[in-house]
Amino acid sequence: MNSITDLIRKEIDTLSTDASRTNVGKVVMLADGVARVEGLSKVMYNEMVEFPNDVLGIALNLEEDSVGCVLLGDTSSLKEGDDAKTTGKLLSVPVGMGLLGRVVDAVGRPIDGKGSIESDQVYSVERIAPGIIPRKSVNQPLQTGIMAVDSMIPIGRGQRELIIGDRSTGKTTIAIDTIINQAKINKQGEQSDNKDFRPVYCIYVAVGQKNSNVARTIKILEENGAMEYVTIVSAPAADNPANQYLAPYSGCAMGEWFMENGRDALIVYDDLSKHAVAYRQISLILKRPSGREAYPGDVFYLHSRLLERSARLNENNGNGSLTALPIIETQMGDVSGYIPTNVISITDGQIFLETDLFNKGIRPAVSVGLSVSRVGSAAQIKAYKKVAGKVKLELAQFRELAAFSQFESDLDAATKARLDRGARIVEMFKQSAFNPIPVEIQTAIMWGMQNDFFDSISVDQISNAVTSIKEYLSISGKDVCDKIYQSGKLEEETEQKLRSSLEEWKKTFG
Amino acid sequence: MSNRSRVKKIANLLLDHSLDEDQRVNEDKVKEILSSLREDPPLQHREILRFFARLVKIHMSSYQGIIEYAGGEGSQIVEKIQASDSFKNSKMELKSSENPELIAGFKLKIGDDVYEDSILNRLNRLRKIIA
């Protein structure tokens, strides 16, 4: 009892007794999470505005005679005529290591029932992206654990790689696989004595999703032991559009803390199509002029200012990085839509997922022709670069020849060989969900493919062969895998060992 | 020019014509403007008048302060403020009213700005910190 009264007394002692000065206004209109306020003549753009019953809003529209505020939280208690006060603060969210393993809402409040967040630092939600001078080119790989991606569309730390495709084509799965793979690499790195090891922390921002989907994602991450490296920022479909609009910026601020403190982080925005829709809703209620597809004129800036905040910083600025994997949902495979083209032009490449491939059972359904990583092989370890260099070309040739071969009954030997090789590569890239493959095993499998170890195996057995190699190498070929993992190179001696390991494996594979 | 911006522009002009040398709204000038508008009503007469009324209200609130006090010795605070040199120099008009909800202290409103030193305000601040 005494301690409680002491606590309150202490708080009273620290209270300022000066007269307070606030700038006030009156709510004249309320609709769909947006309030129009008369007064507030001294409000700043993006300033937090306080409404009765501790409801907060953000001033987004500063007009001659009124201010448009988006409201955060439960607005059912508000009514016209209520007072609104300026706070002099920009919207901020807690940042730091205390957020790892937690699920928070768009303003950083915990929603996982695990108590308050241990964090003594806050970052403003809207921040200016790093300029040219503190940046460095992307040259460190960020392994997704997905062979089709790591070999053909490598992602580097600090890169922004878009995941784009129709509904139910495995976009979120690629992002979650990547997060799970980071957790596996982090654990492996922490167990090793490598002082240069840099873990990658992850932030998953769920915008406009069903609560059940978010719960499923959390469950998957927990089951795979990845949650301890992950922060989830959730603004589900049931949340008001203001929270959905803010969530990516909040998540980005959390990621920036890692980057600015010399650490590496990965942020997934799932998805920016729904984010644009939420922003359109806010803008229409705020009576902003609408443009194409009723989106406001600054919808490009909405995403460009968000994605520009992902960067790789140079050594003078801590050498940290923030990698972004934004997700965009297309309609009927149309990549020429307004929002898809915007985000394609902002990012450093895209992983395009095709419905047809997905339905054919080729999963992940990565379209080789439409997917690209502008960072390219700069974000691959040397060993992988050596074995994966030709794959994309071989696969592209296969797709082209496969289309023509439908009309030809007799094929020459060279064409037939290319078709056979292509079919085997397609099978090799098939990978089950939430089952990322370590880079050293990927290298070994790719090396096996390049050195004709799969040629005598029938196409329908390739998937089994890949699974068998994975098991074999993780037990009997551990030495050679460790060598590739530690050196990052594929030297002659390593190649010899790998050859003998795969020859041994082939004897066991019936 | 859109209808709304036309209404705003006209209402702003009317406000300019309603001000006297001290930049205060002059009642006679307002009456004159209203009668001339009545004689020759412009397009969107009603909207213009509504916006004009809003502008007049906002402008008047910039030199008309409202002070609320908690009663008892609170009225002395009002007298002190009115007697101060800075108040006399500002040429402000001050209206006072009693508000027992403040418990003690005062709350002064000038335009959109609110200056408050009351027990109610301090308790609210404490409530937020504890919550």
Image: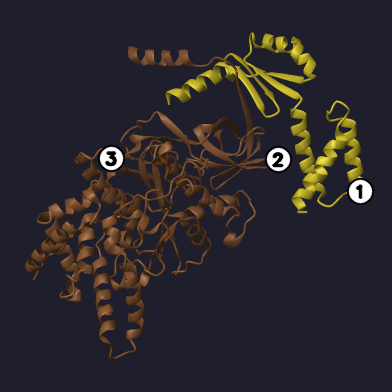
Chain colours: A brown, B yellow
Residue A114 lies, with reference to residue A506, above or below; the image says above
* B71 lies left or right of A508: right
In what element is the residue under mark 3? loop
Mark yes or no: residue A75 visible. no
* Residue A88, picture quadrant: top right
Give the residue type that dot 1 points to: Asp
Q: Is residue B22 left or right of residue A228?
A: right
Compared across the picture, whether A288 is left or right of A214 comes to right
Mark 2 or 1: the one toward you:
2
| Relative depth, front residue between A259 and A479 | A479
Q: Residue at x 51, y 32 (%)?
A: A53
Pointer 3 residue: A196
Residue type at tag 2: Asp
Residue identified by numbered label 1: B40
A179 left or right of B45?
Answer: left
| Residue in the picture at 32% in, 89% down | A408
Name the disc covering residue A65, or none.
2
